[in-house]
Image: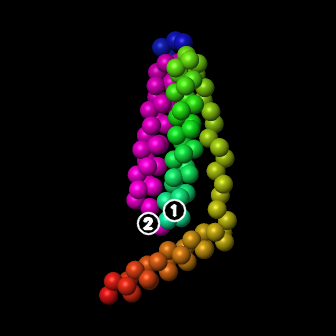
Amino acid sequence: MNAQAENRLALLLGVRMAELDALCTAALTASTATEEKTRLAELATAAARLSASAASAARGRRTLSARPPVRRRTRLERRVNGARRTADRIIARSAGG
């Protein structure tokens, strides 16, 4: 493997590590249990990609596995989530005083 390929691989591994860090932070600061579960699922997927890339690097091969396609939330799902957030906010305010 030449130096340029090694640099790209090191950069890829760094990016994947940063992605894990961001997803871990997002999971820890999630405001709802559903959001936390979603972030943890994304974290698991990202960790698997990092593991595959690191194993490939250890063998001396460079593989850039593509991210799985992102499933877009439907309009109904967005509205339901918005209604849940609003209900949680109302409950929190009424319980607090």
| Main secondary structure of the magenta stretch | helix
Residue 72 lies in magenta, yes or no? no
Residue with the most extreme left position: 97
Q: Is residue 40 above or below residue 58?
A: below
Q: How many marks?
A: 2
- Residue found at x 47% / y 77%: 88
The segment highlighted magenta reads: 5-32
Q: Residues within 10 Å of mark 2 (few under 14, many from 20)?
A: few
- Residue found at x 52% / y 27%: 54
Residue 49 placement: quadrant: top right
Q: Amino acid at mark 1?
A: Glu
The label number, if any, that marks residue 31 in the structure image: 2
The label number, if any, that marks residue 35 in the structure image: 1
Q: Nearer the viewer, residue 95 or 68?
A: 95
Q: Is residue 94 above or below residue 84?
A: below
- Does the residue at mark 2 contact the one at mark 1 (Cβ under 8 Å)? yes
Give the secondary structure at mark 1: helix
Q: Amino acid at mark 2?
A: Ser
Give the secondary structure at mark 2: loop
Residue 21 lies in magenta, yes or no? yes
Q: Is residue 38 above or below residue 95?
A: above
Q: Position of residue 40 (x, y in %)?
A: 51, 52
Q: Is residue 68 above or below residue 5?
A: below
Q: Nearer the viewer, residue 89 or 7?
A: 89
Q: CA distance from mark 2 to mark 1?
A: 7 Å
Q: Position of residue 93 (x, y in %)?
A: 38, 83
Residue with the most extreme top position: 2
Q: Is residue 97 left or right of residue 67?
A: left
Q: Residues within 10 Å of mark 1 (few under 14, many from 20)?
A: some
- Residue found at x 39% / y 87%: 94
**Placement of the C terminus among the 4 image quadrants:** bottom left
